Image (cartoon, rainbow, N blue to C red):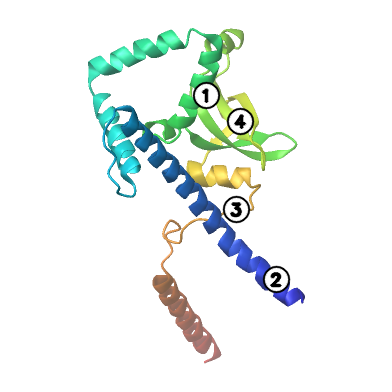
Amino acid sequence: MRYLLRIVLRGSAVTLPMVVTAWILWSALEWLNHVGLKLLEWISMPIPEIPGTGLIVMLATLLVIGLLFQINPISWLFQELEDWLLRFPVVKTLYGAVKDFAGMFEGKKKQSQQVVLVNMPGQGTAVGFITSPETPLAVSKVMPEQDLVTVYLPMSYMVGGYTLFLPRTQITPVDWSFEDAMRFALTAGVSQSTSRLSKGSNPDKSSDKNDENTDKNRNSAIKQAG
């Protein structure tokens, strides 16, 4: 009975991540398709009976918006509108949080999210992320003599964490991707799933190398025996 239960749990562990991931992606695509169809209704355009029409419309719309923001005058106008919106306290909090979250998926934003190891005296070492190489002006005025950086420490299995201003001497940058480090921290080290290609492993080369080492050890043992 325990053996069968173990097999069922193993099957669930393999199937559940795929099912949940597929469901989330399908829900997101379905929502984009729905928004695209509503957009066509709003501009009174005929909706062709082709599956995925709304999704194509949304992708094309996002592409056009991205191209328009490559033009300096449009970027300047949007920046002025954004500055005006950020004058309102509630709008500033909501809009700023959503914008920062969306910026995490932009390539330029990830450059500043350096993964670091934070030395916690008497407790160990924590995984953190440099969210900004500069500290707010108010903090710099209070502690002008220290070279501080803003580090975020996520909490495992919780949506939350701590934002700390730490001296550079207390952190150690590591060559660790943002996605892998965040997954490791949020799951308390349980999830270390990476693709075999990302690990840089080649089964054939590894096998050949092991065979070569085995032959060398065997020859060495024969020489010592002789």
Q: Nearer the viewer, mark 2 or mark 3?
A: 2
- Residue 212 percent coordinates (x, y): 43, 78
- Give the mark nearest the N terminus, 2 or 3: 2
Q: In this view, does 222 lie above or below 166?
A: below
Cβ atoms under marks 2 and 1 closer than 8 Å: no
Comparing 13 with 224, the one in front is 13
Cβ atoms under marks 1 and 4 closer than 8 Å: no
| Residue at (29% x, 27% y) in the render | 43
- Give the mark nearest the N terminus, 4 or 3: 4
Q: How far apart are marks 2 and 1 (CA)?
A: 43 Å
Comparing 158 with 209, the one in front is 158
Q: What residue type is labelled 3?
A: Ser
Disc 2, SS:
helix
- Residue 125 percent coordinates (x, y): 66, 40
Quarter the N terminus occupies: bottom right
Q: Is residue 110 left or right of residue 11?
A: left
Check residue 97 in the rendering and tell me which mark sits there, or answer none.
1
The residue that disc 2 covers is 6
Check residue 191 in the rendering and tell me which mark sits there, or answer none.
3
Count the marks: how many?
A: 4
Q: In which quarter of the image is residue 167?
A: top right
The residue that disc 4 covers is 170
Q: Which amino acid does label 2 sit on?
A: Arg
Q: How far apart are marks 4 and 2 (CA)?
A: 44 Å
| Residue at (34% x, 47% y) in the render | 52
- Give the mark nearest the N terminus, 4 or 2: 2
Q: Is residue 175 above or below residue 167?
A: below
